[in-house]
Image (spheres, grey):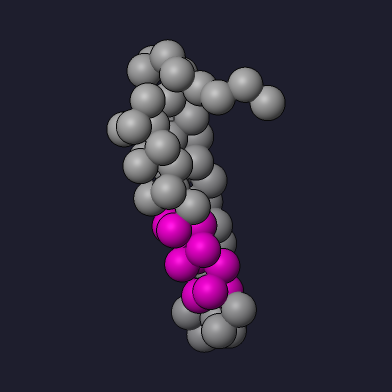
Amino acid sequence: MKPISNKDQQVQYLKGRLQMFVEVLDSIEPETTELEDIDRLISMVDDLEEKVKQFKSR
């Protein structure tokens, strides 16, 4: 896959990933949340942070 170097495309990509994160977060029920759910959220945030770093270096 070709790296995204266009700033508009980068912003759209990040918006989509953030929207996906919000949807996952909204779907979690506090009463039934397990450690794996929290780990998945943390992983999503880490992935977003890594992508932002990659975009900044381009």
Q: Is residue 45 visible?
A: yes
Q: Residue furthest right?
A: 1
Seen in the picture, residue 28 relative to 16 is either above or below; the reply is below
In the image, 12 versus 27, the foreground residue is: 12
Magenta run includes residue 39: yes
Residue at image location 42% in from the left, 14% down from the top: 6
Tell me the quadrant of the picture where the C terminus can be found.
top left
Tell me the quadrant of the picture where the N terminus can be found.
top right
Q: Is residue 23 found left or right of 10 in the rendered image?
A: right
Residue at image location 37% in from the left, 40% down from the top: 52
Residue 13 image point, x, y percent? 48, 30
Residue 39 image point, x, y percent? 53, 74
The secondary structure that most of the magenta stretch takes on is: helix
Seen in the picture, residue 34 relative to 37 is either above or below; the reply is below
Q: Residue furthest front?
A: 57
- Give residue 2's quadrant in the image: top right
**Where does the magenta region start and end?**
37-46
Residue 3 image point, x, y percent? 55, 24
Residue at image location 42% in from the left, 25% down from the top: 10
